[in-house]
Each structure stands twice: as C-alpha cells, then as structure tokens.
C-alpha cells in the first residue's frame, strides 16, 4: 500500500498497538475468547496463514474481493511500490521530503508487503514454499564452499 493510501485509510483503521507486548495482549489465544498469544509459529506456512487472516481483515474493512487475479495484480502493485522505494533508497528519485530514516523504513516495508502478498498467492494456489525452495534453490547446496558463507551468520 502506498503511503498516500495508508494515510487516507488511517482514519478507518483502529489504533495499532505500539509494541509487541501490547500487540500480544490484544490478540486472543487460539481457541479462547481472550488472552495473550505469541507471534505466529515459525515456518513459512504458519506465516502465510497469519498473513491470510490479516488479508481477510483488509477484505472486510475495504470491501475488496480477494479473487485469484486480484492477488496477482496486488502483487504487481506491491512490486511497483518496492521499485519506487528502492529508487528513493538508492538516491535515484526524489525524496518527497522524507528523511533518510523514513525512506529506509519505506523500503523495508515494501519488501515485507511483496513477501506477504507473495505468500498469499502461494497459499491460494497450494504451493508448498518450503518444498519448492528445496527443489529450486537448495538443490545446489552440495556446491557450497566456505567462501560462499562469508559474512553470513
């Protein structure tokens, strides 16, 4: 979502908690009417499920039908916003009066928007992302040499 769209919709959204502990206290634990819960369990499938829940909130609040083509088109929209944020982050477009910190935060946020939307697409079409990563990327692990891991924790 662009910052303009986000700010125009801000009046319609309830206030977000300011920190993770407050966030956890405001979410009901699975199977209960109230009570704190931790962040979603580790793993891409669990993350995709939690993103699906938030996307359904978006659908309900903004009366958007999340069809198959909407998911793909929304991914393309988010990619465009990522490119725009990248250009600002790398000083190749105007800063629109934003500080370096705001520009960096926009860039990080757009990366997460793309990832979230991509996980929604994968979930909708029953793509096991972890299995596909294994099949497409991690099959090359046998070629990894020590210098390939330098600088990676």
Image (tube, grey):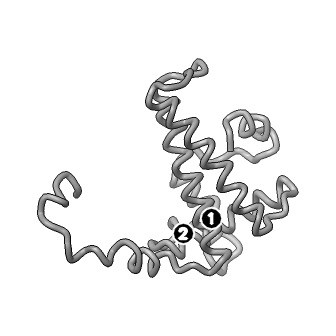
Quadrant of the image containing the C terminus: bottom left
- Residue 130, given in percent of the width and then of the height, sits at 45, 77
| Relative vertical location of residue 47 with respect to residue 74 in this rendering, above or below | below
| Relative vertical location of residue 3 with respect to residue 140 in this rendering, above or below | above
Separation of marks 2 and 1 at Cα, in angstroms: 6 Å
Do labels 2 and 1 touch, CB within 8 Å? yes
Q: Residue at x 84, y 58 (%)?
A: 64
Q: Residue at x 71, y 39 (%)?
A: 6
- Residue 139, given in percent of the width and then of the height, sits at 32, 78
Residue holding disc 1: 51
Residue holding disc 2: 47
| Relative vertical location of residue 153 with respect to residue 6 in this rendering, above or below | below
Q: Is residue 59 shown left or right of residue 72?
A: right
Which one is nearer the viewer's eye here, 85 or 56?
85
Q: Residue at x 62, y 77 (%)?
A: 30
Q: Residue at x 62, y 74 (%)?
A: 123
Quadrant of the image containing the N terminus: top right
Q: Is residue 13 shown left or right of residue 20?
A: right
Q: Residues within 10 Å of mark 1 (few under 14, many from 20)?
A: some
Q: Is residue 69 shown left or right of residue 92?
A: right
Local SS, label 2: helix
Residue furthest left as drawn = 146
Which one is nearer the viewer's eye here, 4 or 12?
4
Q: Residues within 10 Å of mark 2 (few under 14, many from 20)?
A: some
Q: Quadrant of residue 84?
A: top right
- Residue 151, given in percent of the width and then of the height, sits at 19, 51
Q: Quadrant of residue 140?
A: bottom left
Q: Is residue 142 shown left or right of residue 72?
A: left
């Amino acid at each position: 979502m662009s910052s303009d769209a986000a700010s125009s919709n801000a009046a319609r959204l309830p206030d977000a908690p300011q920190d993770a502990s407050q966030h956890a206290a405001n979410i009901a634990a699975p199977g209960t009417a109230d009570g704190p819960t931790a962040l979603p369990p580790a793993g891409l499938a669990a993350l995709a499920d939690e993103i699906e829940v938030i996307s359904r909130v978006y659908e309900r609040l903004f009366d958007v039908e999340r069809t198959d083509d909407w998911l793909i088109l929304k991914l393309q929209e988010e990619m465009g916003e990522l490119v725009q944020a990248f250009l600002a982050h790398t000083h190749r477009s105007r800063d629109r009066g934003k500080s370096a910190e705001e520009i960096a935060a926009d860039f990080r946020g757009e990366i997460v928007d793309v990832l979230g939307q991509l996980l929604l697409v994968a979930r909708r079409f029953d793509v096991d992302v972890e299995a596909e990563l294994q099949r497409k990327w991690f099959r090359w692990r046998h070629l990894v040499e020590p210098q390939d891991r330098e600088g990676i924790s």
